[in-house]
Amino acid sequence: MGPTTMIRALYANLKRPPRSVTDWLADAVRAVAIVIVAVSAVTLPGTDTAVLSMALPAVMLSRMIGLRSGLDLITCVTVFVAAGSNVLELYRAWTGWDLIVHLACTGVLAAVALILLQDSGVVPATGRRRTPIVLATLSGLALSAVWEMVEWFGYRFITDAIFVTYDDTIGDMMAGGLGALIVGVVASRVRLTREDRAPL
């Protein structure tokens, strides 16, 4: 599929009207996320606004690729909770919250990555059940590694308020990998996308 066709499909899924309560809830979370980021731009430090802004592509992309409404809602909530927890410093305040969020957030992002890889033709569809398990897990580990590099960059060059230690990094990556593995197992048995979506 060419880039133009893919863009048209993404746009078609984006403009599709909500058809269920879950669709409406997911769109409401997206709208709230956009408002919070806009407000944070004039009320919070730039670093906090940047962290919150990083959630916006994910919450929009989950609709654009046509995730099932329940998974779409879970993705929107999880990603924005992950960003908000950073701003509210919940990772420092609540022991173990960091690992829970990494497991959940990396899992839903691995689902998004899995669909993009398959739909874009980067990975051919084999029809084998173990393929999504392997792809999702690898995607989750890769995303976890990128996130930890972003954290290190922020700690090294922006602010030393970012908590970065070896144990924290490895623990986060393990939790993210586990979350992605779980999603891969689910994807090997359940369709992750809507039946009425525009295929990419």
Image: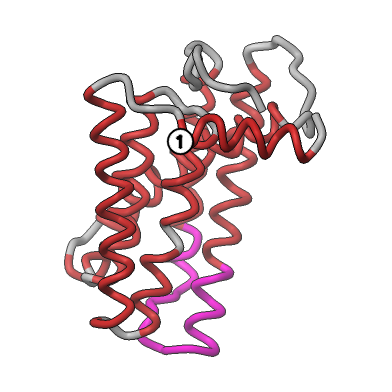
Residue at 21% from the left image edge and 66% from the top image edge: 90
Hey, which quadrant is residue 103 in on the image? top left
Q: Which amino acid, mark 1? A: Arg
Viewer-nearest residue: 172 or 199 = 199
Residue 93: x and y in percent read 17, 69
**Residue 128 image position (x, y, % from top left):** 69, 11
Residue 159 covered by magenta stretch: yes
- Residue drawn at x 82%, y 34% is 2
Question: Which residues lie in the magenta part?
Answer: 149-170
Q: Mark 1 sits on what residue?
A: 63
- Asked if residue 175 can be seen in this view, the reply is no
The picture places residue 153, in percent across and down from the top left corner, at 56, 79
Q: Nearer the viewer, residue 175 or 1?
A: 1
> Quadrant where the C terminus lies?
top right
Image location of residue 182, percent across then percent down: 45, 29
Neighbour tally class for label 1: few under 14, some 14-19, many 20 plus, Cα within 10 Å: many
